[in-house]
Every structure is written in structure tokens, then in C-alpha cells.
Image (spheres, grey):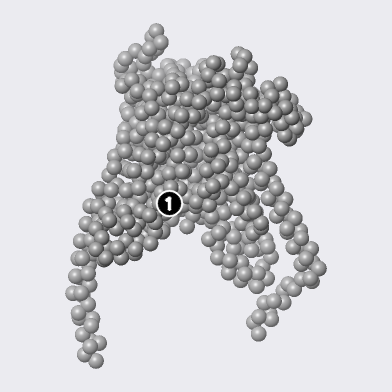
Amino acid sequence: MTVITDRPAAEPAESKRRLTRRRRRITHEGRAALLLISPTLLLLALVIAYPVVTALITSFRKDQSLQNGFFTRGGGFAGSSNYIHWLLQRCGTAACAPGTLGSEFWDAVTVTVLFTVITVALEMFLGTLMALVMQRSFKGRSLLRASVLVPWAIPTAVTAKLWYFMFAYDGIVNRLLGTHILWTDGQWASRFAVIVGDVWKTTPFVALLVLAGLQIIPTELYEAARVDGASAWQRFRYVTAPLVRPALLVATLFRILDVLRIYDLPAILTHGGGGTGHATTTLSILVIAQLEQGYGGASALSTITFLFIFAVAFLMVKLFNASVIRTQQSAVK
Amino acid sequence: MASTTTTTPAVPSRRSTVLRRTAGRLGLYTGIAAIIVWCLGPFYWMVVTAFRQVGFTFDTTPWPTHVTLDDFRTAFDTSRGNHFGQALLNSTIIGAATTAIAMLVGTFAAYAVARLHFRGKFLVLGLVLSAAMFPGVALVTPLFQLFTRIHWLGTYQALIIPDISFALPLTVWILTSFFAEMPWELEQAARIDGCTPAQAFRLVILPLAAPALFTTAILVFISAWNEYLLSSLLSNGNAAVAPVTVAIAGFTGSQPHQEPYTAVMAAGTVVTIPLIIVVLLFQRRIISGLTAGAVK
């Protein structure tokens, strides 16, 4: 009896001691962690934070004008004119003339968003189908998974050249379809070519993410569903779909952020133009084109691009409640 | 009993079960075939074209009828302004340096995040992830400006340093999820047996972590090898340091205004084959690395 009543009285002191010990351990580990993490933070500050801050400052400066092939020094303060130039498509006091980079901004936004929506939707759909096939057991399954990695491993620059060749006027695509389409030149044809190239290259990545999500679903759930008489569709609808959702959302987020900054594929496959000259000009391509005309304008545009992607990422995480970091966090504990 | 009621809804006849199973198998094999053709078809077409004589570039036979190695010779030929051999060497140097720096620095950070308790862990992971998602164009203007000023354009360091911006977050991200699953109790056991923390890490944890480190290094190297945007500008047309991706994008043919399709396909094959071999050899690890942290 006394033993039992004694115990609660002793506990606070004991737990307090344990707590201080734990706290001491945490501060000690905190110091070690700071030491171990600081090189990474320092390097990231150097290669990311410094350029971003510099770009932000430069974006409020006037473009240096080209004289004899060299930039003249000191553009001076430009206020928000670089941003107005892009967002309102104003060149000086008038609207930007067609053909100038300034007039292409909203087209580039449209093209970038168009690529993002179409390719991500296709990749999610095809990737899920591929994952469902790869999940089944059959001989040579690992061989199939290895072959799926091939498009992923090929450098995008090579992918672009590969599809450039296949989409050539005399190329295999026209031969197979019996058409004579200028795939890398026509307005919609060139957009189609870029979309096909991107879907080919990155669907395997999506498929692998979805497959990994499928594999953590316990098989007992399927057995239970089968015992309860659920059809294949019902098993997919009520077991697979909800449980694979987190993996799908993460894959979607990764892919959306990736396509929003797409550069290599349209830049090489359609030489950054296509059709009317800028049918496949994405925001990234526009930044690089502007870079040759002045740092101020290019910095403003790259800052807009960065903020746009950041906003989309923020919105996605909020909307989906996609706990991308939290999954990693819970794995880490 | 409950079991009898649950089995009543569907007891299909044996014949329909067999039929359905055959149909399922058929669908499965169609799916497998479709995936293989879709994924390997274009790659196969590149390799086949690389072996075709120039006059037969647009042949549609599924295998090359006029086999030649000329295209590979053209690819490596420097007389037309292509420096493909040099570019291969450059990519190797840039990729190796980037990987080495990222691994050296990133391993410490990943260890800290996975193993230690400290405030702001969530913040560090968030920073690393947002850094990995960073658009390359946001960096290229200021870096171009800076490297022009300090005369670094067209040097190795101008190509290696910016690569850290995606290599390092990638390293930390993948390694953190690998490290999170390590049996850290073994480290504690070693400490009890009298090891110093450094010894425990070096003698117990490092050997266990070696495969994860190796996988991460492969993934980082591949992503550095595939980089194009930053390199194409910061190499500034200097073929002595430009990587293969830049070299291939700017390939010129034997005659002006003629697309050197077969030579480009040969060059593409040369660039891709080492990657394919690595991927096939380590596919299981690469898949686990690719999906690390993304699903759990």
C-alpha cells in the first residue's frame, strides 16, 4: 500500500531530473548540429541567396546600353520600370512593338502554364498506368523497371536532339504517321513535339514515385476487400486511390515546379522559337534571350519567374496540404 | 456464421475465373510491351541511327542495313569545330568535382538532420527542399554578371560552383531519408564499448552507410552530367571547358547548313551508354534513392 502511494510523490523529482538531462543533451546536440549544418547553409547562401539578392538589386537598375559590343557601365536607378516593362509590356512610354522581347512576356507565361498543365496531367495519368502494370508480379519485372529508367537517365540535351531527329521532316514520326508536318517549326506542332519529349523523359520518374507509393499499401487490405466481395474497380477506387494519393501529390508538386522552369527541351528541340517565332518560348527561355540585351531587364524577369514558381509551390502545399517536408520529417522523427 | 455471408456475393464459376485470369494476363503483357516500346523505342532508334551510313539516315528498317562506325568517328572529329572528346572529359571533371563537394558537405548536414535533436530542423529541411526546387534562371543572370566581372566565364570553376546549387540540396535530401533508416543503436552500442563519437561514426556507421552514400553520389553525378542551362551560358563558348550537353546541342555537320543527324545520334549514344550501364547495374538502389523521402 505505502509503496503504491509513494510512487507518484517521487515521480516529479525523477522526471524533472530526466528533463534537465534531456534538455542538456538537446543543447549539446544543437551545438553539434549547427556545426555540421553550417557548411551546407554557407554554401547555399553563396550559390543561391547571393545571386538572388543580387538579381533583386539589379532588377531595379536600368539596362546598360550596348556600345561597340560592350555593356556601358552604370545603368542607374530604374525604379519599377523593368517590372512595368514585363508585366504591362511597356517599352518606354508606348506598348512594346511586336517582335520585341517585351511583347512576348504574357505569351511566355501562357506557353509555360500550357506546358505545365498538359505535361503534368499526361505524366500523372500515364505514370499511374505504368506503375499499376509494374506493380503486378511477373517474370523479368526488375528488367522492366530498369528499362523504365532509361529515358530518365538520358540527358535532356540528348533527349531534345533525339526527338529533333525523330520529328525531322523525313523523320520516323512523319513516316509512321504518313504526314509531312514540320514538327519543330509549326506553332502547335512544335508545342506538341516539346510535350511529347517531356512526357517521354519524365513519365518513368512519376511511375517510380507512384510505384513506391503503391508498394507501401499492405496486401492485407486488398485481401480484406476481396473477402468482402469488392470488384477490381472497387478495390482500386476505395483502397488503392486514397492510399496512393500522398505519393501522387508529391509527384505532382515535383513535376509542376520542374516544368515551370523548363528550358533545355524547347531551347534545343525548337531552338527556343517554333512557329511564329516564340510558340515554345517559355519564361526561362525568355530570361536567357533577355540576358543578351541587358542585366536589369533579365534580372527583373528572372525575379518574376522565381516569384511565380514560389507562389505556385506555396499554393500547392497549402491546397494539397501536401506534407512533402513533413513526410521527410516524420521519417526523421 | 459470418464467413458464409461474406462469401455469398460472388462465387464465380471456374470457367469464368479462368477466362478472366487469361484476359488479365493478356492485358498485363500488352501493358508491359507498351511500356517497353515507349521507353526504349526512341533510345533504340538513336543507337540504330548512330550505326547507319550518312546516306541512309532516314531509313526506316528496324535495324541498320548499312552498318558503319563512321558516325562515331565524325562525332569525335575535331576538324569541324566539334570538341566532343574534350567535352566528355570536361563533363567528367565537372561532375566529379560537383559530386565530391556536395557529398563532403551534404553528408554532415544530412547526418545532423537525421540523427541529432535540435530546434529548426523543420526549417533546415524546408530550406533544402526549396533550394532543390529553385529555378536555374533565377541564378544565371547574377552569376553571369559576377563571372564576367572577375573574368571567370569559360572556366571550370564557373561551371562547378553553380552546380552546387542543385547538387547539395539533392545530396542532403536523399541522404537524410537514407540516414533516418539507419540502425543508430549500433552507434550507441559502440559508444558504450568505449568508442569516441568520431570512432563510432567511422568504424560502425560509415561502413553501413556506404551503399547509401554511393547511391547518392551516382544520382548527384547524373544530375550534374545532365545539366545544360547554366553550363551553356557560363561556359561562354569556350570548348575547352564546355560539358557534353552543351557540345551536343551545338554540334555542326560536315557540310554547312546540313544537320549532322547520324553524328549527333552517335554522340548521344556515347554520352548515354555509360549512364545506362550504371543505371542497369544499380537500378534497385537508384530507384530507392529517387523515391527516398518522396513517399513514406
Q: Quadrant of residue B199?
A: bottom left
Quadrant where the N terminus of chain A sits is: bottom left
Judged from the image, the secondary structure of the residue bearing numbered disc 1 is helix
Q: Chain of mark 1?
A: B
> Which is nearer the eye, A117 or B173?
B173
Q: Please say whether residue B129 is visible from this viewpoint.
A: no
Residue B134 percent across, percent down from the top left: 42, 38
Task: Kindly identify which residue carries mark 1.
Answer: B212
Q: Residue at x 79, y 71 (%)?
A: B13
Q: Amino acid at mark 1?
A: Ala
Q: Where does the image place residue A187, in percent across and percent down from the top left? A: 63, 26
Q: Is residue B169 above or below residue A17?
A: above
Q: Look at 38% across and 24% down and name the residue there.
A: B155
Q: Visible in this render: residue A64? A: yes
Outermost residue, bottom side: A1
Q: Identify the image quadrant of residue A154.
A: top right
On the image, the x and y values in percent for residue B8 come to 72, 77
Q: Is residue B19 left or right of residue A30?
A: right
Residue at figure coordinates x 48%, y 26% from the top left: B87
Res A239 quadrant in image: bottom right
Q: How many marks?
A: 1
Q: Is residue A172 above or below residue B150?
A: below
Foreground of the two, B161 or A50: B161
Image quarter of the C terminus of chain A = bottom left
- Crowding at mark 1 (Cα within 10 Å: few <14, some 14-19, many 20+): many
Q: Residue furthest right?
A: B15
Q: Nearer the viewer, residue A173 or B264?
A: B264
Residue located at (53% from left, 22% from top): B250
Percent of width and height locating residue A81: 38, 22
